[in-house]
Image (cartoon, rainbow, N blue to C red):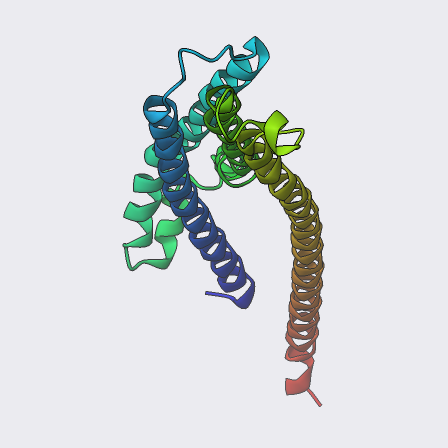
């Protein structure tokens, strides 16, 4: 096996291991977050005596449904592709990497990874904020007419609204930090891949140049060898 072929196979194996790691991370994250979203929707207890705003309930229901759908899609892709990649990676044969579907299914793997780690995480943060509002907002109605009434204490908001606003004020900056980190990480990763590809192209060009020089030397020596037997 030549050096260039060995480099190409090593690159294919690195892509295979990276795809397998992404699918494993997507499956674990999606299973965890989708399960939490389902439990949050089932276990949340709405107060029948409180008049919820329709927009809040619609937002909570839509966010939970989209969150579960996104993570289930990522989980489905991981479940379908990961066994085929695992079967190839467990075979101790360098040429078996060609049987793996990670090259053809590269877009699906990247889409599942993005859904699970980026879109799914943002939806999960929104889910936590909406859950806090749905859970703590009725406290204001229960406090009316009691010793803890905001009007009697001289405050403008109740404890439930204060708790919901506190969770929102914490989650919004954290969400912005998450978005900035995701953009920075993606740009750094693209820059790293671009640098690696340029280095690999330079190595291939050097190997091609060296191979051409060796072929030219072989042709010259073959042309000069018959004349060396005659004085």
Q: Quadrant of the C terminus?
A: bottom right
Q: Position of residue 118 (x, y in %)?
A: 56, 39
In the image shown, does 113 or 217 lie closer to the viewer? 113
Q: Residue at x 37, y 34 (%)?
A: 36
Is 138 or 101 nearer to us in this picture? 138
Residue 230 occupies quadrant? bottom right
Q: Is residue 77 left or right of residue 216?
A: left
- The image position of residue 116, as x and y in percent, is 48, 37
Point 35% across, 44% down: residue: 85
Q: Is residue 222 above or below residue 45?
A: below
The residue under the point 33% across, 29% down is 39
Q: Give the percent coordinates (x, y) of residue 74.
A: 43, 32
28 versus 42 height, above or below: below
Which residue is situated farthest in the bottom direction here?
Answer: 231
Q: Position of residue 19 (x, y in %)?
A: 46, 47
In the rendered image of this protein, does residue 13 appear above or below residue 159?
Answer: below
Residue nearest the viewer, comparing 191 with 143: 143
Depth order, front residue of 147/200: 147
**Which quadrant of the view contains residue 166?**
top right
Please state, as top left, top right, bottom left or bottom right, where the N terminus lies in the image. Answer: bottom left
């Amino acid at each position: 096996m030549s050096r260039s072929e060995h480099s190409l196979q090593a690159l294919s194996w690195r892509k295979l291991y990276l795809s397998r790691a992404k699918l494993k991370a997507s499956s674990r994250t999606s299973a965890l977050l989708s399960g939490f979203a389902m439990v949050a929707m089932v276990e949340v207890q709405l107060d029948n005596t409180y008049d919820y705003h329709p927009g809040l309930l619609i937002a909570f229901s839509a966010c939970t449904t989209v969150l579960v759908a996104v993570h289930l899609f990522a989980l489905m892709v991981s479940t379908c592709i990961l066994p085929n990649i695992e079967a190839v990676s467990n075979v101790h044969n360098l040429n078996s990497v060609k049987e793996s579907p990670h090259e053809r299914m590269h877009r699906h793997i990247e889409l599942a990874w993005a859904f699970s780690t980026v879109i799914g995480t943002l939806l999960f943060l929104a889910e936590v904020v909406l859950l806090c509002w749905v859970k703590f907002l009725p406290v204001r109605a229960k406090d009316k007419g009691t010793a803890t009434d905001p009007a009697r204490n001289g405050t403008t908001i109740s404890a439930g609204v204060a708790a919901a606003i506190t969770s929102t004020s914490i989650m919004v900056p954290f969400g912005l930090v998450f978005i900035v980190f995701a953009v920075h990480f993606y740009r750094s990763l693209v820059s790293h891949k671009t640098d690696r590809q340029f280095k690999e192209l330079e190595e291939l060009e050097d190997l091609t140049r060296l191979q051409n020089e060796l072929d030219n030397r072989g042709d010259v020596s073959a042309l000069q060898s018959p004349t060396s037997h005659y004085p």
